[in-house]
Image (cartoon, grey):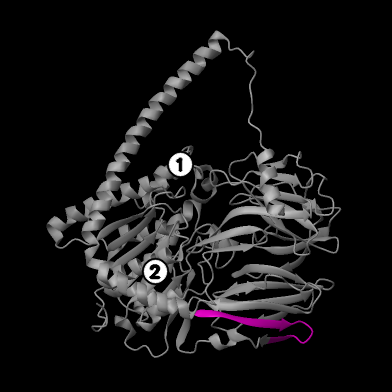
Amino acid sequence: MHRVVILFQKIKLGFQPRCFSTAETLSNSWAFHRFAKSCKHLEKGKRNLCQTLNNQELVQAELRYYKSKSPKYCKLEGWFKKRLETICDRYASSNNSFVMAMNGIEYFEDDGCIYRKLQKEWATDNSLFYTILEKLQSHEVYRLLLGDPRTASEMVYKENDTRFFVELTCTKDGNFITINSNSKTSSEVWLIDRMHPLEAPKVVQERLPELIYHVEHWKKQLYILTNFAATKDYELMKTHISSSGMQNWKTVYAIKENHKLIDMELVNDNCIMILKCYGRLSLNVFSLKQPEPVKSIQLPSWACAIECEAYLRHKSDVFCFQLSSPVQPPVSFLYSMDEDELYMEDDETCLNIKKDYKVTRLKAPGMDGILVPITVFHKTTLNEMNDKPLLVHVYGAYGMDLNFDFKPEQMLLLKDGWILAYCHVRGGGELGLSWHRAGRLDKKHIGIDDLQVCLCHLHTMGYSNPRRTALKAGSAGGVLVGGLCNASPELIRAVVLRAPFLDVLDTMLDPSLPLTQEEQEEWGNPLNDQRFFKYIQAYCPYQNIKPQNYPSILITAYRDDQRVLLSGLLKYTTKLRNAVATNYITMGEPQSIILDIQPGDDHYGPTNWEQSLQEIARHYAFLYKELKLDLGGTHP
């Protein structure tokens, strides 16, 4: 029988329902307590039922409203769908899947965020370690031994703190499986020797507040990326595997200020640090035997994203990787450590180099004087840029970078004369851990301020103007865009949001939601801290809607999204449309406020290729209509 079939049969056998003896009895007092608790749950159930019925009515109302507005965009949407099919077919070999698998983990990408779905690691041929995702979180690690059909899965690790999320990875040399228990601000790593899978996991360093670390293994040494140093940004430290505690950690390499660590690779006896500074990618290479000197290799200026070869040749002297950008398909490169030379590989990817667009890196002075990076793409031959359409991307949360991978649909926009801008605001991770700290908790408003100064700087530098400017964001990026729409709606003409987080306060006040407690390290805890209640209330997009002239807004929501609930988006849309209608009485024609509710799917959107193209075409049709772009009679 196939090993995978056996695996799932055994997983099923490993979980037995708990049974209770009929001899169990309850005291009268306990029975009364249970009765009172049941009545409380019944009342809560009634409230939930009323809310559900109310939401169903709102959903039906929104579906009717969307149907009444869709004819305005329908023909243009079909035209864009055909154009997208053509351009995506052209780059099919370069286009990354919406779902990709690496090291036994399935990843989903969503506008700058990477999410994991299923995790498993083989120790030996007959021993498997895995986690189970329940309510958007993994808290337990199980071991399954194959070969004996009577063997049940055994729990080897359990995380009791709801703020922490458990994941499994394997060290790059393949010797250890690591159990990584991470919150937003702290981490703890346990090691499982793959040759001795029955031994209990061993902790590297017990968790401490604000201590983040990640572990690799090489020749009985643990190489630890950590913020343990005084700067609170990443350093590479090492210790012998027999003495793993932080009191034994010694610095090997310190990352410079304003540099973001993208990844670290161990190749032969060399360490390769992949870095980014204000958008420019580089490699720092040094010997693990003698960390000095460090070789610095600057990568091509057009490169914005790097992906290491899936199977590194650890005993070789070369490092293979691919470089890309949002408008540049992946190109293969090779760095020879012996020769200290960077080569473009002679394969089909070398034909992908695009020379008809330009990448420009700007720095916008923030309201406090801090420079905020912006990356801009446009056609080399583009003239009169102050009247060209501008699409601005932003995220700014969780220390995550904006996604810079190649997306073929962006080529369509460039061909039509668009300018694409990526604003790397504080709260994201583009300039290291300190960049994230500068935009989280009681500094969340700084991300909104940064977005505002980025837009003003782009317009001042001659990139488009407010009536030709659109914003695009998803998930937590919705907080910044929604906040900007409340504070400075005159800077933009249209907005496209995908599963956006817009109701921060009510979400963080509801501990029954699956991620509320985990998210407190990013947004704060308004339940227990009145200071955070007032602070979140002051910037929360939903809480600050007011009658004024908003930009046109298209929100795409998914019914099965458990991260950003449909109920919150229904509330937001209703309140915003009422505010726009109130302003319309005194100010003139109202803008379009549309909620596009898609059946099924989750926070990551459609996994079907056709549905994905349809969604992008719908977004483009909305943007072209609302910005009143002239396509010269080429569209239907």
Q: Position of residue 486 (x, y in %)?
A: 31, 57
- Give the secondary structure at mark 2: helix
Residue shown at 44%/66% (left/top)?
A: 394
Q: Of all residues shown, which one is farthest toward the front?
A: 1
Residue 237 shown left or right of residue 322 in the figure: right
Q: Position of residue 575 (x, y in %)?
A: 27, 49
- Residue 367 visible in rendering: no
The mark total stands at 2
Amino acid on which disc 1 is placed: Pro
- Magenta-drawn segment: 328-342
Q: Nearer the viewer, residue 114 or 210?
A: 114
Residue shown at 71%/42% (left/top)?
A: 157
Q: Which residue is mark 1?
A: 526
Residue shown at 25%/48% (left/top)?
A: 61
Of callouts 2 and 1, which one flags the residue occurring earlier in the amino acid sequence?
2
Residue 338 shown left or right of residue 308 in the figure: right
Residue shown at 52%/51% (left/top)?
A: 522
Q: Position of residue 164 (x, y in %)?
A: 61, 46
Q: Nearer the viewer, residue 621 or 82?
A: 82
Crowd tier of the residue under label 1, counting other residues whose Cα lies within 10 Å: few below 14, some 14–19, many 20 or above: many
Q: Which residue is mark 2?
A: 453
Is 339 magenta? The answer is: yes
Amino acid on which disc 2 is placed: Val
Q: Nearer the viewer, residue 501 or 479?
A: 501
Q: Position of residue 318 (x, y in %)?
A: 75, 80
